[in-house]
Amino acid sequence: MSQALDENKIGGLGVSRKRVEDNRFIRGRGNYTDDIVLPGMLHMEILRSPLAHARIKSIDTSRAWEIPGVRLVLTGEMAATRNLAWMPTLSYDTQAVLATDKVRFQGQEVACVVADDPYIAKDACEAIDVEYEPLPVIVNPEQAVAEGAPLIRDDKAGQADNVVYRWEVGDQAGTDAAFEHAAVVSKLRLHYPRSHPSPIECCGSVADFDRATGKLTVYMTTQAPHIIRAAVAMVAELPEHLIRIISPDIGGGFGNKVPVYPGYVCSILCSILLERPVKWIEDKTGNLISTGFARDMYLDGELALRADGKILGVRMHAEADHGAFFADAQPSKFKIGLLHSTFACYNVPAAHLTARGTYTNKAPGGVAYRCSFRVTEAMFFQERMVHQAAKDLGLDPAEFRRRNFVRADAFPYRTPFGFLVDSGQPEACLDVGLKAVGYEDFLRQKEEARRRGRRLGIGISTMTEPLGAGNSREYDILGIKMFDSAELRVHMTGKALLRVGAKSQGQGHETTWAQIVSHELGIPADDVTVEEGDTDTAPFGMGTYASRSTPVAGAAISMVSRKIRAKARKLAAHLLEVSEEDLEWELGRFSVRGVPEHGVTIQECAMAAYGNMPDGMEPGLENHAYYDPPNLTWPFAVYIVTVEVDPETGVWDVLNTVAVDDCGVRINPMIVEGQIMGGLTEAYAMANMQFITFDAEGNCVGSNYMDYLLPTAWETPGFELHSEVVTPSPHHPIGAKGVGECAAVGGPAAFVNAVMDALDDTGVRNIDMPLLPDRVWEALTQHHDVS
Ligand code: MCN
Ligand code: CUM
């Protein structure tokens, strides 16, 4: 009789285990960077530029120094004496830490003050007198490349214009040929506006340099502590073993906490200069106007179509606005991120993509907000183009997609841009979604409503996206390959400590990682403590972004557990006095083949590792694994939204949202659903209300929550989630695919397509996000596109 454990009872794979971290979060007992208080700690505040582009004529700090309680007033000139006025970015560019020559965006860091408390520091910032000479301002790529445009990066030798890069991929000749044979060419010009992840907790750091030991400890809000350690080692020229980066609890990251920010660097420099701990906590406006934003990309897209709806070719040109410094945290090789992951779920014979990045007088960044290295733009553009192409052909958008999907039996499929999509069931997911939303029925309702002057619309978005960067052949950041890691220590009682190179910002890693160990070893999840975010204790990892944690770190957790199991097998053989080959594994237990009652538990093996190991065996039950994934994982998703647009006001209401996510095996279904709901909320926000814009002088409109709208529970519609279709990743040890970003990536196009569908008799081809009521109303009344 089998004595196997029930995985459901020990919190293994597929269990909606309650989030263990929430125990402290919902009791207000989290430990965030601002909760760190060290003896003798001082406080730092940053003076930011009010102008978007101006030469600095002088900075007079004398009044600030006179304020009682002020310990240090740091300018770029002083930082320069330590070679720290500038720093390298994660994209091989440079970024000013504190401005010396010019300010290049509104909100740029100009000086900082360290004082006994943050209020003194803030007051002292206002006592710094900076004389600016305003320069002409550039706020979009078109202005950046216009004749006679002022040169933003005159600090860079050899930089003669405002172009950051030109990049292209695909087959130009083949694509041109496809367009020659097209019956219909469908064109669309789209803008994905600048938005911001706006985590509840802003960025911050507590730097603590100890002169006696020479050790620098930095508590900070980072999604990637080991990358920060490497960057600090390079910038501050300190040896790595004397740098400890600790990322405590994080109040949301959403990609905003990947880059290296001047505030971090300044707090470190100030701590080194003062030999005291220095805390910097950014305010909301500072966060919104100066830290890693999202998107800001223009697209010219064209589809070559056969009359029956077959896509023959895709042509795309993207213009990306990178702000004043190219600071994207993304794989080095791909200048515009993974934009070329576009059209990966469609069978497209020929494709060509060109891209140009430009400097503008805006904050640096671009890769953030559940973006998977710009897959967000890729899928938005794709699904808007697909929707419009169907309309141009007079085909049903669902049917048009079906005709062009890569069929389930055609995987692995190589896209014309070079990705290997290894698995998926597009049609099966679409079927579930259409049925759930009642597609045919809704189309009838729409027609009937139209006759009575009401406007209903339905929007579909279907996509597969590459998650889990990534295999070391292709993916690196600053030359460091994008593998990840796990270290597992099984104590003698069979309890365990798991340390991982990723770093949760709210995704629930402490809960789900233990479930993987539980699945592999049969140790109850409650017996596994998960630790992340401390470079002195965690194994080297590249951190959490691009939904890479499950695909990469999650796989490492499986692999290290299997190494532990392999050693436990030797211990079991010793305890049971049989050879290893005679043992059978069932969850949590080895037994002698054919004699199931004769066995030992994993806990008994653990005890033996410390008290009864065979001669010659190294004691202990610990190991680590570094995992370099063979490919990315390819989740597939269908999002379908129905709306009603009020023709009198342009206001649109969401009637129904259906999401079908196939992210392979789900470790924790409840957490996955939470991720999808969060992503759909963000998708709705971007489609409906959320963007950061700039006036002609480069003033940021969106610097506070009056201008930058976050949907509350009141505005957010309900979502219907489906998980019927499960296509395991063929290479991931437990078949899981990433999911954290899917709904934010694929969702926006579904909302926009729904509104466009409601306007499909007006001749309007596009309204740019966000679809604010006045924009929709303008399109409805003027019958033209609105951007
Ligand atoms: N999961 C699962 N089964 C799967 C896939 C994932 O149970 N098949 C679980 C994971 O174990 C993890 C969560 O779902 O607990 C998300 O996993 P994954 O898709 O691997 O994504 P990451 O953990 O790498 O998270 C990063 C992703 C990104 S890039 C952004 S941006 C984002 C997001 O997660 N930021 C978030 N979701 C967020 N959620 C919260 N609460 N806070 C953020 O800052
Ligand atoms: Cu691009 S936002 Mo997430 O990858 O941290």
Image (cartoon, rainbow, N blue to C red):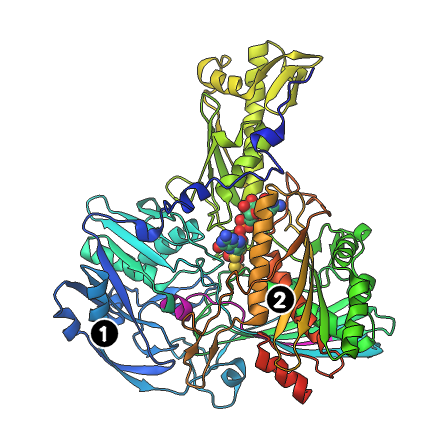
Left or right: 436, with 319 as reference point: right
In percent of width and height, residue 669 lies at 61, 44
Distance from disc 2 to disc 1, alpha carbons, whole Å, reads: 41 Å
Q: Where is mark 1, residue-wise?
A: 126
Q: Is residue 562 visible?
A: no
* Viewer-proximal residue among 384 and 767: 767
Asked if the residue at label 2 sits under 8 Å from ligand 2, the reply is no
* Viewer-proximal residue among 23 and 298: 23
Asked if the residue at label 1 sits under 8 Å from ligand 1, the reply is no
Residue occupying the far top of the picture = 577
Magenta-colored span: 286-302
Q: Is residue 332 visible?
A: yes
Give the residue type at disc 2.
Answer: Pro
Quadrant of the image occupied by residue 67: bottom left
Q: Earlier in the sequence, mark 2 or mark 1?
A: 1
Left or right: 514, with 63 as reference point: right
Q: Residue at x 81, y 67 (%)?
A: 400
Q: Residue at x 44, y 52 (%)?
A: 224
Q: Residue at x 52, y 45 (%)?
A: 484
Q: Where is mark 2, residue-wise?
A: 748
Graded by Cα atoms within 10 Å as few (under 14), some (14 to 19) or many (20 or more), the crowding at tag 2 reads: many
Q: Quadrant of the C terminus?
A: bottom right
In percent of width and height, residue 154 lies at 39, 80
Residue occupying the far front of the picture = 452
Graded by Cα atoms within 10 Å as few (under 14), some (14 to 19) or many (20 or more), the crowding at tag 1 reads: some
Element class at badge 2? helix
Left or right: 777, with 222 as reference point: right
Element class at badge 1? helix
Give the residue type at disc 1.
Answer: Glu
